[in-house]
Amino acid sequence: MALSVEKWVGFGSAMAGFGLLWSRMPEHVHDEARYIISSLVPMVMSYFNPYEQITISEYGQERIGRNKLFDAVSTYLRRACLDHASKLKAELRNNSKYDDPLISLDENQEVVDNFEGVRMWWRLCPKSAKNKGGTVISLFTGDSDEPRCYRLVFLKRHRTLVVDSYLPSVVREWHELIATNRQRLLFTNHSRDGKSHWIRVPYNPPAKFDMLAMDHSKKVEIMEDLTAFREAKEYHSKVGKAWKRGYLLHGPPGTGKSTMIGAMANFLEYDVYDLDLTSIKDNAELRKLFLDTTDRSIIVIEDIDAIEVELTTKRESKEAAEEKDDNHQVTIELSDKNKDKGKVTLSGLLSFVDGLWSACGTERIFVFTTNHVDRLDPALIRRGRMDRHIEMSYCRFEGFKMLAKSYITEHSLFGEIGQLLDEIDTTPADVAGSLMPRGKRNGEIDRLLDGMNGAPADVAGNLMLRVKRRREADDCLARLVETLKKAKMKSAAPAMDSVEEAKED
Ligand SMILES: Nc1ncnc2c1ncn2[C@@H]1O[C@H](COP(=O)(O)OP(=O)(O)OP(=O)(O)O)[C@@H](O)[C@H]1O
Ligand SMILES: [Mg+2]
């Protein structure tokens, strides 16, 4: 049967070719006869050919971005139709939480699927050279080959079933599988042969919201905001807005901006795209990268102020030269390395965050981080582009308790620590650093355990853990008090100097 399907489809092509040939017959063949025959051949063919075919290409029109249906079909066929295939492919995924090889269909292997008693024939067609009628070069990949595609062949009378039920069910299964099985990924852009690509690694950030040292109500507000965003598909389509949200995280170094991104990714179960603007040649490259991102992802640009410094300086000089031309079309010179290569502009960046291209993906979160919010171009961070501005601030007592809670919830040094944290600006990173256990006093614990002959293992283990934790907590908190006192003295030193200077005067 499979062979006959192929024959029919092949016969169709042959007849179409014949029709084309006929239409190019010499002039002396009567025009009218030529017209009638060339339109009759496909009609006759179509009448006798009981099959239809749908092609699902790896890339969309003009190859702007991947065709998600292609990925859905790959996953579906891997699950549903490998049993009867004789030509398979195996690869070890570097982006999976599993170590087992991934088996999939090899090119040109035909498989048959059964849906509601109806047979469907699938085949993965390899890349082929495109040479008819001149070379068509992909807009972004610069590739002149026809991409790979799946061919689905079915009986004509089942077209409605295929389009309305079968293909949607393939997509549904794909979504379900992704939701249950998938390994989250961290992507970063990388330039090879003058072209930018995403490279990806498995991503399991340890950060969780409950570990984040920050104002509790602020934290709850952010989590509620993220939940509302995730559930707002209908709202966005009803009001005709792109389903995206922008967060600006600002605050001094070490206050948890990057940690917050990890916590967001964990909370939403999204992939993260860490966009390094310094290695992007121009707006076209930026566009390609954006279009290659997947939905349900967080797109991050860290330290946006580093780029903005250049932008602001440039803009100021341009404004001086052109008497306040404030059109935001100023070029960002991203780095000395790229100075001569090309340009990414602020407007190029904004078109993805908030402009025409922002509608090209759904369920995207943009996160910009900066240590210097005051240096950013207002155009970049205005509300609507960056929907929420979140300030990550120094560690106070509440934040400290959050960081310390994995060791201890109450201690005699807490009062002193609370007072010191109120007096000096310390980052959560510094506090977390002091709270790291340094593996001291193990000898003492060993001696203690030696004296507990015959104690059940779990009691001994628990006791050891308790003693260890207590000792560690004593050490850590004492070390933290010491660090904070030193920092306090240091911050008081210039003031003391000026008092002394005033006395001398
Ligand atoms: N608010 C916080 N809650 C919990 N841990 C924190 C917090 N802030 C910092 N840390 C700890 O300090 C380390 C550094 O923090 P992080 O990299 O998130 O800071 P950052 O604000 O991104 O700094 P930078 O501006 O230099 O990029 C983290 O690994 C984390 O362990
Ligand atoms: Mg950071």
Image (cartoon, rainbow, N blue to C red):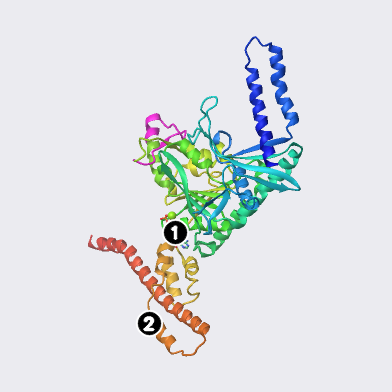
**In the depicted structure, whether residue 390 falls above or below residue 8:** below
Which residue is rendered at x = 45% and y = 70% of the image? 418
Residue extending farthest top: 28
Measured as percent of width and height from the top left, residue 139 is found at 51, 33
Residue 331 lies in the magenta stretch: yes
Looking at the image, which is closer to me, 352 or 43?
43
Mark 1 residue's CB less than 8 Å from ligand 1 = yes
- In the depicted view, which residue is nearer to us: 94 or 383? 94
- Classify residue 449 as left or right of residue 109: left
Disc 2 from disc 1: Cα separation: 36 Å
Expressed as whole percent of the image width and height from the top left, the position of residue 94 reads 49, 54
Q: Judging from the image, what secondary structure is the residue with disc 2 in? A: helix
Residue occupied by mark 1: 255
* Quarter placement of the C terminus: bottom left
Rendered residue at 72%/36% (across/down): 51
The magenta segment: 317-336
- Residue 148 in view here: yes
Looking at marks 2 and 1 on the same chain, the residue that comes earlier in the sequence is marked by 1
